[in-house]
Image: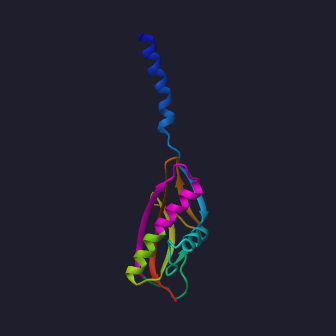
Amino acid sequence: MKSKTILAVFVAGLCLPIVSQARDTTHYLNFNEVVQEAVAAGRLDGSVKFYLDSQPNGAKVVSKGLTTSKKTNAFNKSDQAACSWALQSALIQFQTAAQNAGANAVVNLVSNYKHNVYKSRENYECHAGGIMAGVALKGDLAKVR
């Protein structure tokens, strides 16, 4: 009996490292595809434009340094689908903030996952695991013509 208990504890101990190491895969995905998907689905109304790591000429920044961090359930979803949902949630939050501030754009938008900035004019950074996916963004609200 004692040997069976020791064996069970030993086997359980072998499984712990596997369970405790959660997957955290970094993806760099196309930003504009997700924006278009959100507008087509009616989740974004198109009144606020998003500019990755840039701002158009003549943009007047009305609020600097807005941040958001959104996570979504990734269970039984592809990483790309989960990342898309997380990004759309972040963009909805920025759209609402822009509208409340009288702005019509989010400029200088960068990924800011765990406060590590990733700049791109085409892609956003997303981290996906077996249970959750997350996107963090930082940007400025502006009025553009």
What is the x, y in percent for residue 133? 50, 54
Between 126 and 110, the one lying in front of the other is 126
Between 145 and 108, the one lying in front of the other is 145
Residue furthest out toward the left: 100
Query: Please, which colouring scheme is shown?
Result: rainbow
Which of the 4 image quarters holds residue 93? Answer: bottom left
Which of the 4 image quarters holds residue 82? Answer: bottom right
**Magenta stretch containing residue 78, yes or no?**
yes
What is the x, y in percent for residue 103? 43, 83
Which of the 4 image quarters holds residue 99? Answer: bottom left
Range of residues picked out in magenta: 62-90
Residue drawn at x 50%, y 82% as measured from the top left = 47
What is the x, y in percent for residue 81? 57, 58
Q: Looking at the image, is 39 positioned above or below residue 21?
A: below
**Magenta stretch containing residue 123, yes or no?**
no
Question: How many numbered dots are placed on residues in this image?
Answer: 0
Residue furthest out toward the front: 41
Position of residue 113 in the picture relative to residue 77 (left or right):
left
Q: Looking at the image, is 50 positioned above or below residue 86?
A: below
Residue drawn at x 55%, y 83% as measured from the top left = 56
What is the x, y in percent for residue 110? 51, 68
Residue 52 seen in the figure: no
Residue 46 seen in the figure: yes
Quadrant assignment for the N terminus: top left
Q: Looking at the image, is 76 positioned above or below residue 62?
A: above
Residue drawn at x 52%, y 54% as measured from the top left = 127
Between 96 and 122, the one lying in front of the other is 96
